[in-house]
Every structure is written in structure tokens, then in C-alpha cells.
Amino acid sequence: MATVCKHHVTACMASADHRQISKRALLERAGINPQLLQRRGQRFHTEQVARLFKSVQDSLDDEFMGFTESPCRVGLFATMAELVCRCATLGELLERALNFYNLVNRDIVMSLTRNHQRAAISFIMRRPELDSEHFMAEWWLVIWHRFPSWYIGEPIRLQETHFTFAEPAHRDELEVMFPTQLSFNRPTNQLVFDAHYLDMPLRRNTLQLTEYLTNMPADLMTIPGSADTLESQIERHISQRQPGRLAFLSLEDMAALLDMSVQTLHRRLAASDTSYQKIKDNLRREMAIQQLIEQRMTVEQVAERVGYSESRSFSRAFKHWTGVTPREYCKQRSARG
């Protein structure tokens, strides 16, 4: 699981204030304990943040989350993705996709250019003052890097990333999101990459696209190549041991399975700002939410499946993760229909 910094969690809800939408309700709906936003350096996993993004979009019926003058109706991205799925090359896909957005909205003006060996996807926000924290500009750049990369089956290696705004305090986060040379105060927001990518064939079919759209926006947040991280390897080992439930190995057994010492495992996880306990807790939280909501299991059943011998211990942990008890979380979801 990739993680997202606190800045993007708070920034995505900026428009909620103007629409009289409760930020606390949005956070709890996403399974995020609002009190965690008070912690310096707090990070959140993509599944949590994806639920938050989708909750904001659904509450506003706006895929642009209130950061443009006119809303972009929920479902428009999926419509675009389905329209371009039969293109032969990435260049053809991008031309059609960007033309589509330029036709249906006037708030984000997009273009694709090719100059000898370099290509660029560029856009400007017509009303940048509505996006004062630059959340939408950064998120739109993420989308137009991750989505094309997914379609060709490999990460597009960026040569440069340009931003129209000044260097922000969270520059370090942008260096993770866009692992390339960053440039600020530029005329357009822009992704620059080798032009050979435009000639690459698409490697996804309609069934794969359907699954991808179902998992959005979580898949868009995943940095290409992150499935090979140590954290992801540990998650796979745990998740695949017993389908439908979590069966945890001891730290010593996990280190042996990964062919490293316990000390090396500790050190490498700490370098990624995580730990074996954090990984276990994140897996527990995500499976608990999925089984409570989608499979409608009882609290007792879920507690046993995620590795708790007592439902009371599970309820305390769940409240720590999300800010509400499992039963309160289910009631909130049921009230929204």
C-alpha cells in the first residue's frame, strides 16, 4: 500500500467548507480518524484516501471536487476511458482523451505536443484562484501520468514535471509523486517524457478497464512500480496465506521468508516510515471495512477474521483507526444508503 501525506488529505476537502459539508463526516466515512490530522507528519494509506476522494466527489457530484468554476459530473472520467479503449496507440488515446475534456469542460484547458524526441501533456487551470492549495493541479498531473502508464502496461519515465505555482512546503512529497526534475512558476502544468511512448500499443482490454474503473481512484494513486516494494511483498505474503482472513507470521518468520535478518527488516521498513505492526494494522483496517460494508458480516465475525480473539479489542482498535466504532461506522454507511 502506498501512503499519502496529510497535506493532500486536508487539501482535498477545501471546497467542503463552502458547500456546508462536514469534514468530520467525510473523514469518518472514509475510515479516517479526524484526530490523526493533528499529528505532525501523519500519513494515510491509499485505500483510506481513495474513499475520501470519492466521498468528496459524490457529495459534490463533481469529479473536480469543487476546484473549478463548473462541476464535472461524476462518471465523466469513466465515460472518457471507455471511449478511448479501442485506440491503437498511446498517442491516439491521449489526443482523443484530451480533446474529449476540452469539449466537455472549459475550466481545465489541455494539450498534447510532440517535438522531435520529447512529448508533453500540458494544461492550465482557467480559475487557479479556486485551487488555492494547488490540490487539483497536482491531482490532475497524477491522473495523466498514472492512467496512460496503466494503459501501456509500464510506467512512463518522466523527464520533467512543471507546475504553474511556486515551490510548496510539501515539495518532498511531489518528488515522490513525480520522480523527475521539478520546475515551478512555469506557464503551464506539464508532464514531459520521451516521445517514443506515444507510439506504444495499448495493452489493456475492456474487462481490465472495468476492473480498473471499479478500483478508482485508489489505482490512480499507486506509483507505478510500487507493487515491488518491501511493504507490498509483506502484504501479499500475509493476504495470500488464508483467503478471506488474516493469518499473521511472527516478525522472525516474516524476516526468514524474505531471506533477511530481523534487524535488516526493521531497518528497511523504518527507512520507508513504516513497521511490521503498522502493516498488520493497515491490513486489518482495510479488511475489516470491506467485510463490514460489502459482506455485511457481524462485528464478532470480522474481529475473528482479522486476527482478534475478542470483539471488544477489535472495536477499540477500529475506533482508533477511524474515529468511530464498527457499529457506528455501519450505521453511518447505512444512513447514506
Image (cartoon, helix red, strand yellow):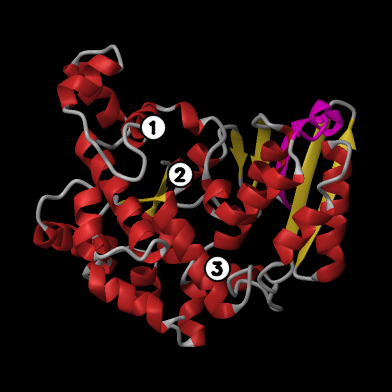
Whether 251 is drawn above or below 63: the answer is above
Q: Residue at x 61, y 77 (%)?
A: 61
Whether 219 is drawn above or below 10: the answer is above
Residue where numbered disc 1 is placed: 236
Rendered image: mark on residue 173:
2
Dot 1 or dot 2: first in sequence order is: 2
Whether 114 is drawn above or below 147: the answer is above
Whether 214 is drawn above or below 153: the answer is below
Looking at the rendered image, the disc whose residue lies closer to the viewer, 3 or 2, is: 2
The amino acid beneath tag 2 is Glu
Rendered image: mark on residue 253:
none
Q: Is residue 190 magenta?
A: yes
Circle 1 packing at 10 Å, graded few (<14), some (14-19), many (20+), is: few
Q: What segment carries the magenta color?
A: 188-203
Q: Is residue 94 magenta?
A: no
Nearest the viewer among 270 and 170 is: 270
Q: CA distance from mark 1 to mark 2?
A: 26 Å
Residue where numbered disc 3 is placed: 132
Disc 3 + disc 2, Cβ < 8 Å: no
Relative image position of residue 220 (x, y in whole percent): 58, 48
Dot 1 or dot 3: first in sequence order is: 3
Tell me the quarter of the picture where residue 194 sits: top right
Q: Residue at x 44, y 50 (%)?
A: 46
The amino acid beneath tag 3 is Ser
Dot 3 or dot 2: first in sequence order is: 3
Nearest the viewer among 215 and 322 is: 215
The amino acid beneath tag 1 is Arg
Q: Image check: 5 left or right of 34?
A: right
Relative image position of residue 296 (x, y in whole percent): 36, 66
Circle 3 packing at 10 Å, graded few (<14), some (14-19), many (20+), is: some
